[in-house]
Structures are given as C-alpha cells and as structure tokens.
Image: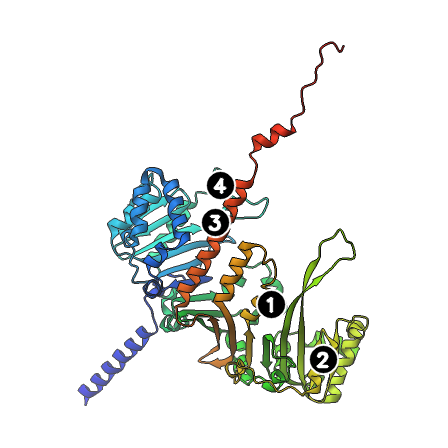
Amino acid sequence: MKSFFRLTILFVGVAFLFSSCSKKNEEGKMIPKNAMFVVQLDTKSIKEKLTWDDIKQSYWYGQLYAHLQESNGTQASQVKQILDNPEKIGIDLNGSLIFFVAKNSGPDGELVLEGSIKNGDDFAAFNKTMDSSATVKKDGDLNMLTLHDKAVVAWNDKHFVYAFDAGDAKSRFNPMPGGNFNQSNVAPLVDRSVTLSSLCKNLFSLKSDSSLAGSEKFTNLLKEKGDIRAWINSEEIMKSSSSLGMLGMLKLDVFFKDNVSTYTVNFDKGKIDISHKGYAGKEFSDFLKKYSGGSINTDMIKAIPSQNVLGVLAMNYKPEAIKDLIKLIGMDGMLNSYSDKIGFNLDDFVKANKGDLMLAFTDLSVKKETSSDSTMPSSTKPDFNVLFSVSIGDKSSFQKLVDAGKTISGEMGRNDTSIAYGQNDKVFAITNHQHFLNDYLAGKANNKYDFLDKLNGHAVGAYIDIHKILSALSTEKMDDPDHKQIMDESLNLWNNIYVTTGDFKDGALTGQTEINLIDQNTNSLKQLNHYFDTIAKVIKEKKDKEKSEMKTPESTDSLMIPPPIDTVGHK
C-alpha cells in the first residue's frame, strides 16, 4: 500500500513538472517580461517563401550591393562574400530572429536583436567587417564587441545579442528639420557602450520569472503558425508615458492593466493572413467576456442603395455595455449631470439603441473643376457617398437623443447642405447626399454583396475594396509615366481587405485580418518584393533623371554675374 502511495505521489509530481514546463518557452528566455514591443521573424519559413536567389535578382538588392561596396572600400570583397552567401555570417537562419524594445530608466529604452549562432568564428569575422577597429573582449563565456561606439554585440556558442540605444537611433534618423540627423561627431555625455554591455550580459542571465519564458500568453503566441509574430505590451508602454497620471484620475488605466496584444502574420498564396488577440486585466476581461459576441446586422448593409461599395464598417454591441463601460471608468456621474441638462440620460441611451451600427463609403469618382479665373488651371476633386446608420430601439427614447443632437450641433447642420439625416421605423441615418439618404431609408435595395459571407456571424466586421478605390483614382496624373507605372503595379497587386473581431475566447478578444491580392497563385511575400522593388526602381530613376536635368551651380552662377564696370576716367 505504501509503495502504491509513493508511486502515485511520484506520478503526480512528474505530471506537474511536465505541465509546468509546457507553459514555458525557449524563445522568451532572453526577453525581459516588461519588453514593450517584441517581433519574431521565422527566418526558415520566410526564406522558403522568398529565397535569397529571389532577393539577389531584385533591383533594390543591386542598389544596396553597389552602395555597400562603395562605402566599404578595401573590405568590399568581404561584403560581396556575405551578400552572395548570407549563411557565412554565422547566424542560424533556420531558427528565428527576435527584435524587441527593452525598457530603461530613460524615455527611449534600448533596441535589441537576438538570434542563434551557427558558427562563432564566422560571426566574429562578420562583425569585424562592420567595424575593423573593434576588438573582441572576453567576459566569462561571452564575447563582447563594441561597434563604432554606437552598439554592442555579445555572443556565446549558442546565442547572440545586438543592443542599440533607441534615443540615439531616433536622433540619427530624425528626418524633421532641426533634428539631430547625422550628428555622429558630437560626443555623448554618457558612454552608452557601458550601459549596452551591461544590458547584453543581463539578457544572457535573465531568470525565468523576469523573462517571457514563463508567460503563458507569449508561449501561446509562439505556438501559432506564423512567419512573423508580434507582442505589444500596452501597459508597459503607458507606464513610460507622462500622461498616465491623468489616465489614472479618469480610471482609464483599467484599459491598460495587463493589456497585451499579439499578432501572427502568414504570407500565403494570394493573401496575407493576420490573426490578432487582445488580453486585458481581470476587471476589463470580465467586462469583455460579459458583453462580447453577437453578429452584425446584415440587413442594414444590404439596404445600401449602391452596387459600388468601397468600404463598410459594421458593429453589433449590447447598448447596456456602453453604460457599464462609462461606470467602469468613473465618468457616469459627470455625463449624467451634463446629459440631464439637454434632456436625456444613460438609461435613455440604452433604451434608444438596438445595438447595430454601420458606416459605408460608395461610388467614388473624380470630377474636374474649372476655375472661374481663366488664368488658374483646372483641378480635380473626389466625390463619394458616406452613410452612417444606427438601428432604433425605443422610439421615444431615441427622439430624445435626436433632440439633444439638434441642441448640441445647432439643428444638426441646419445651414450645412452637405449633411442630410433622417429615419424610418428601423434605422436613423446621416449621409452627405440627400438623394442617397432617401434611397436608403426607402429600404427598396436588397443587395447580395460577396463580402457579407465573411463578415456575417461576427460582432465587428470591416471590408475595404482597395482595387475599386485605386481604379477610381487611376485617372489622376496618368500623363506622368512614373505615376502611371506605380498605379498599374498597384492595380495588379491589391484586391481587398476583410477584418473581423469581437469574439472572446480563451481569455482574449480575438480577430482576423485578411489582405487579398489579385494574383491568387503566387505567394504574397514574392509579390510584395516585386511590388516594392518596382517602386524603388521608379523612384531611383526619377531622381537620377532630375539630377541630370539640373544645371550645374557654376553655369548658373556665371549667368548671374554682372559685367564689369569701367571706372577709369570717372572720378
């Protein structure tokens, strides 16, 4: 009996050990748990979809290659070897690369890049190529190297870490006038290499409870299929914001407590799939769990009096959720005291609304406008229909909202002919064209849009027809060959976007974004590479052409020099 009892205890202990280990992950061991942003690239998956040979054939690669050869002088041959065979840099490209922003006592933090080592000697040689004056120093089992006094790289036989100062990167690449762009000759007040070296060493010795290794949410993210995975910690971001104190006064911090968003991106044939999850603290999670779900009102969409829909946003919500949300952030007293003065309160709002909302854009066209001044060139102006609609619950309560709206906005744009509003028994609508409003409220349309199948059944759904928008705008500047080439490439690439969300599952608010391309047979990553490669070529050739057409300063100055004045004999 005692043997059986001991065996049972042993079995339970082993099961507990394995269940505990399953909630940990290797990727998160060297990432601080308070990291604000984390991006993981599955390099093995990505290079299978876009090979290095594909990259080497691209225009932008050739330009990068030429630039690096020019800027590296005597080391050009080493640069060529690296670009020809990136495996020689010593990084394991069958693993993953992780980029994150670490926090420090300052407002900017540090940028960190991590990955796995394949060959330590090759990795050391690669870094020496970037800074030939740098010297490798040993610190225990770590190799440390400072690159141009701007970054520190540390590695052992398994992993590497690059650390950069985020503030320095922001100032060096600030494109705004007055920024600190290219001020590399200014000596820093503090030797950042010491801080960055300390950061690198700390990352190699992070304890499990101080890293993302023990985070169940991060572990779940890594389990999802994806070429790119992203982690955004909104709570840590807001802690670094100076406005957090004000948010705390309004209890808006309830939105950011334990707030983490995760994303996975997959480059598939003909489309880009993005899965997203939103986690929150217990208080806000309980709220989301209680009020999530539902399905959009497709009848409101079918009633749109147009076949030429450019985009739709539809939402189904529980009106009482708005009231509880306002109470949750502590603004109910203030809003009630104000709303009572104009004739309604939160209870009226709940009764007035049925919980359906829709925003739609249709019938985009570009119209030419001729100026009354004959000396001024004609211009173009886009024209389209905008429709905002909500479903009506209790009619008397809804009328209170309408009356309050008139009071606030001065008869809801009484003197503005660009706004039209009205209602029938089911919906209230606002548009920018009276005829469009009349047709919508008449309710005669019953359009069977293709996009409804993907939006139906979700609490929030959005659709954007990129191709229709581009097609309507394609007549603009078509006499410019560069603009025409970019527009043609865009029309050949982009199709539409679907977004759905609003379902609460496994402790998170889940959603899906699908970006569809015209070519459904080629991987989207290859198509994007070709697209941006074409744009880069057009821009580069345009700049080269503009430079060649510019007059040299010498010839310009010679034309501006006045002839000499003969002063002889004039006294």
Mark 2 closeness class: few <14, some 14–19, many ≥20 residues within 10 Å: many
On screen, residue 481 versus residue 345, left or right, reads left
Per the image, the residue denoted by label 3 is 169
| Residue where numbered disc 2 is placed | 437
- As measured in the structure, the alpha-carbon distance from the residue carrying label 1 to the one carrying label 3 is 40 Å
At a point 74% along the width and 53% down the height, the residue shown is 376
Q: Nearer the viewer, mark 4 or mark 1?
A: 1
Amino acid carrying label 4: it is: Leu
The disc, 2 or 1, on the residue closer to the chain's N-terminal end is: 2
Query: What residue is disc 1 on?
Result: 472
222 relative to 71, above or below: below
Looking at the rendered structure, the number of numbered marks drawn on it comes to 4
Which of the 4 quarters of the picture holds residue 378?
bottom right
Q: Secondary structure at mark 2?
A: helix
The label number, if any, that marks residue 3 in the structure image: none
Q: Within the image, what quadrant is residue 217 found in?
A: bottom left
**CA distance separating discs 4 and 3:** 16 Å
Mark with earlier residue (4, 3): 3
Q: Position of residue 553 (x, y in %)?
A: 57, 33
**Callout 4 touching callout 2 (CB < 8 Å):** no
